[in-house]
Image (cartoon, helix red, strand yellow):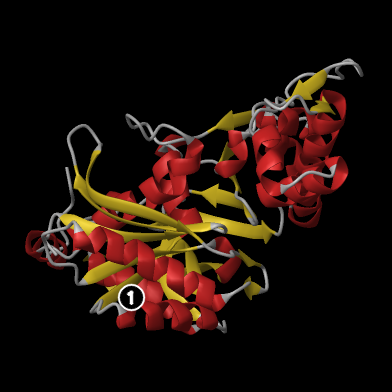
């Protein structure tokens, strides 16, 4: 594959997307091919049907390959939060005397911290919430400390461990497709870095990704995720409730769901939703079912805050908006209902891109951005620069 382009496999809880792209002008992307394929999905217990997942990946990759003239030897795989556990750790290393901080010292800090962890799974990524040089100042990112002199290096570090079964299953499928190298990226971390501005991440930030069968709530700080949880909740469960509550099939439930608007209050009991055949359904009942699905997610978030952030930190966290993205925002008024239910401000996040400026594209665009960043680090000039500990201007 050409050095300037990358291949990405985005795994959502109802479909997989394989795409090839490169960096464009003004923070845009150039696409050479993209294909999405549905499959049975996953929950916190794993894939519902491993063979369904395998078929979807093979179909998506094969379709893009047929129309791409270049070589594809490496693929970057987004690992859903349901298959990732995050471990954060404060760690310090000291030197015999002051030395200039380079990538070697940062690597030593990460390795020393990692050696003290006891965690199951494959470590697929590491990142920093912040660094410190013993001056009580927080430096957000390695480039801010590179070239500085210090006798010690401290860091609030994050390590991301992927479920071994997920890694083995995905690796086997991609090896079957003749990929020579497979690089795993935590999807929620990629979204946090891409969708949330750095200044926002330098204080605590909350990111809610509402998917189809799985949703994730992440607490972000600096360039890392403090903690996160995935919930077996999303649009698919709301669709199932509509099918049961209205006694309708899947297609009709989908049509009703994506035409609903739950941003307002109580509607008239006489207001009806009518399809082309003349069948009518109560809008009040529809809205109550949809709101109930979002309420289940809100209850899970409230339990998350009660578990980790009660007491003296509650007031500070209450003022932070919840940033929302994902397929769940295909329902009009979803973000507004969540804001009212949680009594918190919400902010909708999506890629700042022509044609892809919708929350449903957040995951794949974030992974493409992260993959391009990793690809850049493989370059010769980047490696030479960091070997000498130079500071970027």
Badge count:
1
Residue at horizontal 78 percent and vertical 28 percent from the top? 279
Residue 129 appearing in the image? no
The residue lying at 44 percent from left, 62 percent from top is: 155
Q: Does residue 93 appear to the left or right of 315 in the view shown? A: left
Location of residue 2 in the rendering, given as x and y in whole percent from the top left corner: 11, 60
Q: Nearer the viewer, residue 179 or 286?
A: 286
Q: Nearer the viewer, residue 271 or 159?
A: 271
Frontmost residue, 218 versus 52: 52
Image coordinates of residue 120 in percent, x first then y, are 57, 83
Q: Quadrant of residue 307?
A: bottom right
Q: Is residue 300 visible?
A: yes
* Foreground of the two, 67 or 357: 67
Q: Going by the picture, which residue comes out furthest to the right? A: 269
Going by the picture, which residue comes out furthest to the front? 277
Quadrant including the N terminus? bottom left
The quarter in which the C terminus is drawn is top left
Query: Where 46 sits versus 9, above or below?
Result: below
Provide residue 221's location: percent of width, then percent of height: 52, 49
Question: Looking at the image, is 34 positioned above or below residue 246?
Answer: below
Where is mark 1, residue-wise?
108
Quarter of image, res 214: bottom right
Which residue is drawn at the image coordinates 13% and 60% (left, top)? Answer: 382
Q: Residues within 10 Å of mark 1 (few under 14, many from 20)?
A: few
Question: Left or right: where does residue 219 sit relative to residue 340?
Answer: left
Query: Residue 81, position in %: x, y?
Result: 56, 62
Left or right of 125 on screen, residue 182: left
Dot 1: element: helix
């Amino acid at each position: 594959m050409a050095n300037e382009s990358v291949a990405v496999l985005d795994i959502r809880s109802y479909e997989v997307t394989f795409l090839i792209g490169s960096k464009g002008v003004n923070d845009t992307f150039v696409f050479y091919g993209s294909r999405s394929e549905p499959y049975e999905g996953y929950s916190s217990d794993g894939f519902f049907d491993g063979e369904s997942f395998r078929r979807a990946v093979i179909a998506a990759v094969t379709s893009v390959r047929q129309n791409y003239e270049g070589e594809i030897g490496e693929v970057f795989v987004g690992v859903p939060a349901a298959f990732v556990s995050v471990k954060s750790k404060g760690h310090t290393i000291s030197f015999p005397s002051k030395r200039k901080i380079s990538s070697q010292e940062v690597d030593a800090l990460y390795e020393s911290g990692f050696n003290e962890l006891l965690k199951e799974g494959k470590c697929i990524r590491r990142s920093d919430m912040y660094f410190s040089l013993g001056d009580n100042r927080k430096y957000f990112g390695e480039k801010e400390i590179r070239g500085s002199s210090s006798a010690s290096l401290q860091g609030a570090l994050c390590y991301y461990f992927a479920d071994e079964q997920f890694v083995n299953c995905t690796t086997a499928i991609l090896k079957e497709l003749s990929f020579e190298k497979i690089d795993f990226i935590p999807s929620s971390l990629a979204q946090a870095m891409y969708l949330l501005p750095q200044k926002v991440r330098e204080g605590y930030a909350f990111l809610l990704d509402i998917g189809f069968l799985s949703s994730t709530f992440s607490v972000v700080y600096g360039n890392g995720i403090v903690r996160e949880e995935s919930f077996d909740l999303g649009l698919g469960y709301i669709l199932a409730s509509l099918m049961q509550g209205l006694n309708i099939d899947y297609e009709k439930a989908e049509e009703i769901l994506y035409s609903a608007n739950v941003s307002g209050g109580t509607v008239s009991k006489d207001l009806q939703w009518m399809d082309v055949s003349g069948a009518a359904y109560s809008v009040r009942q529809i809205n109550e079912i949809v709101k109930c699905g979002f309420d289940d997610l809100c209850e899970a978030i409230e339990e998350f805050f009660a578990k980790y952030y009660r007491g003296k930190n509650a007031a500070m966290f209450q003022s932070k908006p919840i940033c929302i993205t994902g397929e769940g925002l295909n329902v009009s008024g979803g973000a507004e209902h969540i804001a009212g239910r949680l009594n918190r401000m919400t902010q909708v996040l999506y890629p700042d891109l022509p044609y892809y400026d919708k929350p449903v594209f957040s995951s794949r665009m974030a992974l493409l951005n992260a993959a391009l960043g990793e690809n850049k680090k493989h370059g010769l000039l980047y490696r030479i620069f960091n070997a000498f500990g130079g500071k970027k201007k």
